[in-house]
Image (tube, rainbow, N blue to C red):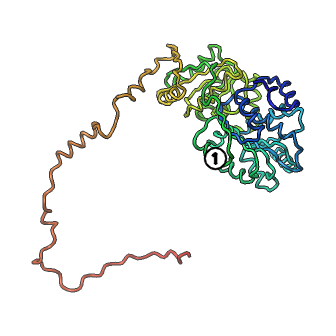
């Protein structure tokens, strides 16, 4: 479906035309009409499918139909990270270019001047506020944020926000909203906790599900079964084969990201790191340099896996296997966006073998195996984990190991105890003379003085 076939204003169509948006994605096609009709919505679609435009376009159009009351916030968009708030704010500027709709990004990681600007804007009011939960609550506690006239409440990357522990913050914000509002929830996955949240804040919602947790078809997926110590050399090998620009490498921890980034810089690759220990200004600079081509390789934790729109990623490398299949989909979803081709390579060490088997089972595919170059040493056997999983020798309570056998034989050789105790342990008989007179009083222990007891 084309955007000009939707029931949206000419001004919004002009903005879309200037941005060269012509065809709706499936999530946009199925969501925009529902939102324009005033229904609550819960939408599930993987990253990179155009969810932001799916809710911004109809909401902007509806907000433009009426004037904003003085000092009022009319729409709140909740997002998990600073980067996503900034990205949505930039998209909002483009979509609303020909319409009198204002927006404001509220997020942390700024200096005192930025906080003061946010404070002034919230006092004055805004049509649409894009905020992280913690920073919006910080402003609300100061008493000048009025959410009583909010018409639209939107949760973007809802599953990610719950994973980050924002559930209580979201409910505190919901408590300040009017009951008569339109609530929209967008999520890449639909676990039970998301369904429970939807029941508590949505009213008779329409459900839209698009390609839940499936990678884009144009992603060329492959895997190296390797030892942990072989990973760094394999990564350099990939770069030397020509895949050294527009690359994101995902690792499991901040420490490993720092170490790997330093190692790649020592090898003269133009590399930067991205993780939660960087302050907001440093993160923005890294993203800006990567977009501008001053950095070729970005090594990151999963902070970069969702919601960040960076175009033309040529390759994604999973240096470590992610913990969940959905995280794997989010990571490799950074490449092959907007019908482009992309490459995704995963390094699977022996300890991660079973986890990657579960990812393949979840996706119902067998990812192509790559051969490790001979100079890097011998790779672990492909069927090593299968041997342990299917009838291989295991330790268990029903099988006696060497230590258990020794303990068992010791129990057999242990002499039996006599039926009666030796005579010296027996109680004195009645014939034994007992000492006459009163018994000696027991000595009492001296008590130390610790002062009067506290009440």
- Residue 318 figure quarter: top right
92 vs 294, nearest the viewer: 92
Question: x, y (%) of residue 79?
Answer: 72, 40
Asked whether residue 406 is in view, the answer is yes
- At 90% from the left and 38% from the top, the residue drawn is 100
Q: Left or right: 137 with respect to 9?
A: left
224 vs 445, nearest the viewer: 224
Q: Quadrant of the N terminus?
A: top right
Can you name the residue that lies furthest to the left here? 431
Question: x, y (%) of residue 164?
Answer: 63, 43
Q: Left or right: 141 with respect to 97?
A: left
Q: Quadrant of the C terminus?
A: bottom right
Question: x, y (%) of residue 264?
Answer: 64, 24
Query: Which element carries disc 1, helix, strand or loop?
Result: helix
Residue topped by disc 1:
199
Q: Is residue 48 above or below residue 181?
A: above
Q: Left or right: 396 with respect to 350?
A: left
Q: Is residue 75 above or below residue 320?
A: below
199 vs 232, nearest the viewer: 199
Q: Is residue 223 above or below residue 441?
A: above
**Dot 1 crowding, Cα within 10 Å, few <14, some 14–19, many 20+:** few
- Residue 412 figure quarter: top left
């Amino acid at each position: 479906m084309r955007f000009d076939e939707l029931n949206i204003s000419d001004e919004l169509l002009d903005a879309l035309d200037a941005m060269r948006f012509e065809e709706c994605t499936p999530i946009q096609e199925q969501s925009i009409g529902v939102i324009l009709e005033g229904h609550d919505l819960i939408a599930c679609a993987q990253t990179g499918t155009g969810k932001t435009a799916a809710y911004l376009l109809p909401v902007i159009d509806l907000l433009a139909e009426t004037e904003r009351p003085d000092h009022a916030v009319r729409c709140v968009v909740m997002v998990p990270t600073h980067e996503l708030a900034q990205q949505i704010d930039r998209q909002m500027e483009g979509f609303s270019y020909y319409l009198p709709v204002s927006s404001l990004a509220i997020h942390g990681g700024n200096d005192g001047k930025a906080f003061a600007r946010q404070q002034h804007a919230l006092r004055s009011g805004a049509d649409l506020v894009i905020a992280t939960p913690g920073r919006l609550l910080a402003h609300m506690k100061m008493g000048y944020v009025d959410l009583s006239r909010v018409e639209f409440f939107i949760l973007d990357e809802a599953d990610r926000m719950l994973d980050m522990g924002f559930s209580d913050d979201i409910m505190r914000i919901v408590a300040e909203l009017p009951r008569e509002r339109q609530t929209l929830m967008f999520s890449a996955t639909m676990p039970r906790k998301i369904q429970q949240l939807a029941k508590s804040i949505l009213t008779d919602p329409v459900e839209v599900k698009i390609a839940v947790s499936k990678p884009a078809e144009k992603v060329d997926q492959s895997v190296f079964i390797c030892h942990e110590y072989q990973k760094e050399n394999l990564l350099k090998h990939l770069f030397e084969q020509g895949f050294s620009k527009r690359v994101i490498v995902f690792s499991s921890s901040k420490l490993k990201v720092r170490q790997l980034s330093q190692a790649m810089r020592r090898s003269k690759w133009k590399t930067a790191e991205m993780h939660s220990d960087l302050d907001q200004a440093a993160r923005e600079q890294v993203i800006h340099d990567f977009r501008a081509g001053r950095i070729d390789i970005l090594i990151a934790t999963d902070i970069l896996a969702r919601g960040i729109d960076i175009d033309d990623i040529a390759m994604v490398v999973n240096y470590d296997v992610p913990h969940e299949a959905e995280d794997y989909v989010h990571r490799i979803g950074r490449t092959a966006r907007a019908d482009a081709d992309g490459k995704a390579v995963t390094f699977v060490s022996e300890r991660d073998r079973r986890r990657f088997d579960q990812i393949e089972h979840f996706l119902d595919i067998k990812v192509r195996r790559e051969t490790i170059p001979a100079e890097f040493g011998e790779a672990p056997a492909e069927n090593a984990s299968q041997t342990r999983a299917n009838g291989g020798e295991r330790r268990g309570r029903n099988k006696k190991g060497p230590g258990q056998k020794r303990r068992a034989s010791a129990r057999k050789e242990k002499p039996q105890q006599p039926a009666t105790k030796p005579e010296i342990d027996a109680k004195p008989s009645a014939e034994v003379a007992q000492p006459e007179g009163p018994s000696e009083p027991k000595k009492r222990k001296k008590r130390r003085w610790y002062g009067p007891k506290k009440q």
